[in-house]
Amino acid sequence: MATDRFALISWIQEKLCVYEGITIRDFTESFADGFALLAFVHSINPSLVDLEDFKMKSVTEKARVAFSLAQINWSTPSIIEHHDFAYELDESSMIIQ
C-alpha cells in the first residue's frame, strides 16, 4: 500500500507541478484548502473551471465545485462531502475519492 500511495502522490505531483502555490506532499494538508482539487480538475480539462474565480472562495465552495465537476463530467461518486473540508481530512477517504 505504501508503494501505491507513493505512486499516486507522484502522479498527482506531476499533474499539478505547473500550478503556482500548490505543493502536494500528502492527501490531507495538501488538499485542505480545496484549491488543489480544483487544480486537479483543471489539469484534466482546463475548460471546466477558471481557477482565478476561486482564489478567494471558501474551502467548502472550492471542494463543492471540484466534486460536482468530477461527478458531472466523469461520473465520479462522492465518498466524502465538500463540507468535510471544514474539518480534518481523512487520508484514506481522499485516496479513494
Image (cartoon, rainbow, N blue to C red):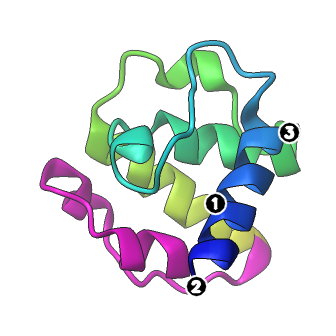
Q: Is residue 25 magenta?
A: no
Q: How many numbered marks does the figure carry?
A: 3
**Secondary-structure class at tag 2:** loop
Callout 1: helix, strand or loop? helix
Q: Label 3: few (<14), some or many (≥20) within 10 Å?
A: few
Q: Nearer the viewer, mark 3 or mark 2?
A: 2
Residue 44 place in picture, x, y as percent: 85, 51
> Where are the magenta residues, as a range?
74-97
Find disc 3 in the rendering and name its residue. 47
Kindly identify the amino acid type of the residue bearing the numbered disc 2. Answer: Met
Q: Earlier in the sequence, mark 1 or mark 3?
A: 3
Task: Between residue 21 and residue 44, name the one nearer to us.
Answer: 21
- Is the residue under label 2 in contact with that under label 3 (CB below 8 Å)? no
Instruction: Determine whether label 1 and label 3 are within 8 Å by CB.
Output: no
Q: Amino acid at mark 3?
A: Ser
Distance (Cα) linking label 2 and label 1: 28 Å
Q: Please, which residue is most extreme toward the front here?
A: 3
Residue 15 vs residue 60: left or right? Answer: right
Residue picked out by circle 2: 1
Question: Is residue 71 something one can see in this rendering?
Answer: no
Sequence-wise, the earlier of marks 2 and 1 is 2
Find residue 32 and report its horizontal and vertical position in percent: 33, 43
Residue 79: image x %, image y %?
41, 84
Between marks 3 and 2, how big is the CA–CA gap?
A: 34 Å
Marks 1/3: CA–CA distance: 11 Å
**Residue at the spot of label 1:** 69
Task: Tell me, yes or no, if residue 17 can be seen here.
Answer: yes
Between tags 2 and 1, which lies in front?
A: 2
Query: Compared with residue 32, is residue 3 higher up or lower down, i.e. above or below?
Result: below
In this view, the residue farthest toward the left is: 87
**Quadrant of the rendered image containing residue 90:** bottom left
